[in-house]
Image (cartoon, rainbow, N blue to C red):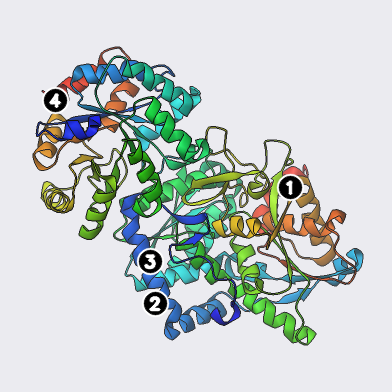
Amino acid sequence: MDSLVKKYNMPDKHGHFEEFGGKYVPETLIPALDELEQEYFKSKKDKNFQKEFFNLLKYYGGRPTPLYLAKNISGELGFNVWLKREDLNHTGAHKINNALGQILLARKMGKKRIIAETGAGQHGVATAAAAAKFGLECIVYMGEEDIERQKLNVFKINLMGAKVIPVTSGSKTLKDATNEAIRDWVTNVEDTFYIIGSSVGPHPYPMLVRDFQSVIGTETKKQFKDITNNELPDRLVACVGGGSNALGLFYPFIDDDVKIVGVEAAGKGIDTNQHAATLTKGEFGVLHGAASMLLQSNDGQIALPYSLSAGLDYPGIGPEHSYLQKTKRVEYSSATDNEALEAFKWLSEKEGIIPALETAHAVAYLKNKNNNIKKNEHVILNLSGRGDKDINTIAKELGIEL
Amino acid sequence: MNRIKQLFSNDSKKLIVFITAGFPEKDSTKDLVLEAIKGGADMIEIGIPFSDPQADGPVIQEANEIALKNGITLLEIFEQVKDIRRQTHVPIALMGYYNPILKMGTMDFIKKCNDAEIDGVILPDLPLDESVEFCNNLKDKNISPILLVAPNTAEKRIKKISKLAGDLIYAVSILGITGNDLSSKNNLENYLAKVKENSETPFMVGFGISSNDDVEWFNSFSNGAVVGSAVIKKVLKDRKKGVVENFVKSLKK
């Protein structure tokens, strides 16, 4: 992967993306993070590790995923929409790429117990699958509110032998599940590996999650070049919660002449107080081990984010996204619940592909005329996950009883 | 000389008591702090409530939630401390998480600490590597940055941490969060000996300390014992006047 990245070289050796990133954690976790960093750098150079990882992605995860020209919506929109079909991964989303990478690290480090946080449950499912495959104990922290919204995923996690621990503190969603996972890790740091699900948290997590996910962009680039006789796409689009599917697609293109757009969840609108548009509306702060942009009150308390999609209602964002926004390398836009819902139905009807509600935010970007996508442009959209898990939420929104 | 340095320059047994600001009522801070001092506390830590207290167990989490519901703000905490200062010379440290301080602006925060005669600052989520500038700015105002060490902190790092701290460090007794159970005395003894040998400053020990026996025991292996969750637990159960004073008395008899 290194050979693709010539100019861009982030984070620095302390895990900073300029003022973003870093390790803002209790002292107890410092040795664990240092150990993880060392192990990660070793594994990155280790051909056997890389081979094992890519074989797992291929034979267990189902990679490579197709890059599919969605002709029906392309015809309607007047530009070419290519869907990177991460929804076709085992367990239904891009999350498995990272879970498999991290579980290999856990195994190398001799950790017997795996913990994870989950919002929409996709990361919980991916981690439970990986833990089952490697015969490791797995505990998934999940907010009570999310357990209610994502019952199907809770059931799947349990089926694969992992335990879901409901989190009842704070807003009972992803941020609180993350707090609880960190508390568990501080307490059981000697035998436990924390598989963080997005490009968030203290260094080295944002970096290693990005690297494990960058298989998405590396594959996409090759696929697009093969199809077009060595061309680059004009634009990349992905939804951003913590930001791992987006970085996975973006990173291998970061030095290329390609416009890149991340789409945040605007909930009921960015001018209301019910949204999760961290980069659009947030301010600099520190949460869950990293400095980044944050939704917060005037007194520095973390604000409760809102989005209809459980995977995007996080008050922070990966530090690298804050950096990419600051340097203007990536443009950040947002889509509301309603726009996402409409896009969800639209993609399902036109292409026979039911996207995750999170992904539908990126799909909504395509439909927004203000984005000035030129005629015949080639736009690649990361179809980060499938919508099965969201069927109940959607039905409820549409007033349909299942 | 700052009050913390002065306190830790003598060898007497020390009890440090933690009180969450704005808990159980918004204006309880002063009463509870003064009760703790009357009960015999040698130093006070005032907790700045935070929405996401990652290093805290359920008891202090609950106190944080109540305090935030009461609407306490960092600015009001400074006013409360000024008021407390008029009645006591016991050292006071603020303990909290980094984000509310960043939001206020670190220099503004330090200035306000100085104005309120705060003697020390403890931030569990601002470890050595991220805190050099902040610590030096505190020290410029003669305020002690009280950095933390943990049972798994390497010897060399204990040295570095204590050097940056300058006056006092805080040894977390366990791998864990506030209010957790203590590990075996044997493990603790080895750990505290390691801190003693490597720290260039005095050190106090906290997390999981809840009884008179604990306070005695930790004082024989360190320079002071911090009691937090156990105090807050008493107040959660019984908000009557005198509860904190009596409990602190029992800790230090």
On residue A42, which mark appears?
Answer: 2
User: What amino acid type is highlighted by mark number 1?
Assistant: Ala
Q: Which quadrant would residue B17 be assigned to in this image?
A: top left
**The N terminus of chain A sits in image quarter:** bottom right
Residue at x 45% of width, y 77% of height: A44
Q: Are marks 2 and 1 on the same chain?
A: yes
Q: Is residue A369 left or right of residue B32?
A: right
Labels 4 and 2 touching (C-beta < 8 A): no
Q: Decide: marks 2, 1 in contact (CB < 8 A)?
A: no
Structural distance between the alpha carbons of marks 1 and 4? 62 Å
Give the vertical position of A75 relative to A325 (above or below): below
Question: A18 or A368: which is nearer to us?
Answer: A18
Q: Mark 4 to mark 3: distance in Å?
A: 42 Å
Residue B122 spot, x, y in % from top left: 33, 39
- Towards the viewer: B102 or A185: B102
Label 2 or label 3, whichever comes before in sequence order? 3
User: Dot 1 corresponds to which residue?
Assistant: A395
Q: Amino acid at mark 4?
A: Lys
- Counting residues from the N terminus, which is met first, the one under dot 1 or under dot 3? 3
What's the residue type where badge 3 is placed? Leu
Disc 3 is attached to a residue of which chain? A
Check disc 3: other Cα within 10 Å, few if <14, some if 14-19, many if 20+.
many
Q: Is residue B137 left or right of residue A292?
A: left
Q: Which residue is mark 3?
A: A36
The crowding category of the residue bearing disc 1, from other C-alpha atoms within 10 Å (few below 14, some 14 to 19, many at least 20), is: few
Mark earlier in primary sequence (2, 1): 2
Q: Nearer the viewer, residue A25 or A402?
A: A25
Determine the secondary structure under disc 1.
helix
